[in-house]
Amino acid sequence: MKQVIYAMQFKGKAAPGASSNMMKAATSASSNTLTTVVGADGVQGKFEPTAGGKAQFESEVTLTGATSFLEKGTIRFGDSNNRLHFSTVEHGYLGDSADPKRKSGAVMWRVDGGEGQFAGASGYITSNFTLSDAGEVTDNHFGVIFVK
């Protein structure tokens, strides 16, 4: 088995779904590097664009409580058929944040398989995200994927 890791920042929109307790999210991320530096003043981190393609994210979110949700979706890496399919492990969390115009949350997804490079894939992806009152999403992923 080969291990593929990635860290990307996705940005896009969440919009109402098929029912009142559903949302559809559509975001994208450019190729990037993530830099983390620990120094005398603490920790600093940033995503910086780098040469390469984009990743496209689409999901369906089902609200299951005041702060909980389930989610399933697909991430396509590049213009080819390299796709991951995922679903929520237990429930995700979405709650208030220090910014009154944004909610924040976190979720862990199980890789349910994929296509192309990710045929037969397994693993997990963690997401820390914000959702603005206008439906703008910023979603920070860290994935550890196993492929054959």
Image: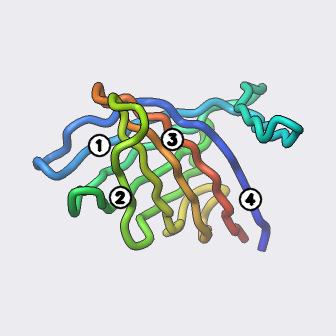
Q: Position of residue 37 (x, y in %)?
A: 84, 39
Splitting the image into 4 quarters, where does residue 143 fall? bottom right
Is 65 placed left or right of 27 in the picture? left
Residue contact between numbered discs 1 and 3, judged by CB atoms under 8 Å: no
Q: CA distance from mark 3 to mark 2?
A: 14 Å
Splitting the image into 4 quarters, where does residue 10 fall? top right
- Coloration of the structure image: rainbow
Q: Which residue is mark 1?
A: 24
In this view, the mark in front (3 or 2): 3
Residue lying farthest to the right in this orientation: 40
Q: CA distance from mark 4 to mark 3?
A: 19 Å
Q: Which residue is mark 4?
A: 4
- The one nearer the camera, 133 or 74, is 133
Residue contact between numbered discs 3 and 2, judged by CB atoms under 8 Å: no
Q: Is residue 102 above or below residue 121?
A: above
Q: Of the residues shown, which amino acid type is indicated by label 4?
A: Val
Is 113 placed left or right of 92 in the picture? right
Q: Which residue is mark 2?
A: 71
- The one nearer the camera, 30 or 106, is 106
In the rendered structure, which disc, 2 or 4, sits on the residue that comes first in sequence?
A: 4
Splitting the image into 4 quarters, where does residue 68 fall? bottom left
Q: In the structure shown, which secondary structural element does the residue marked by tag 2 occupy?
A: strand
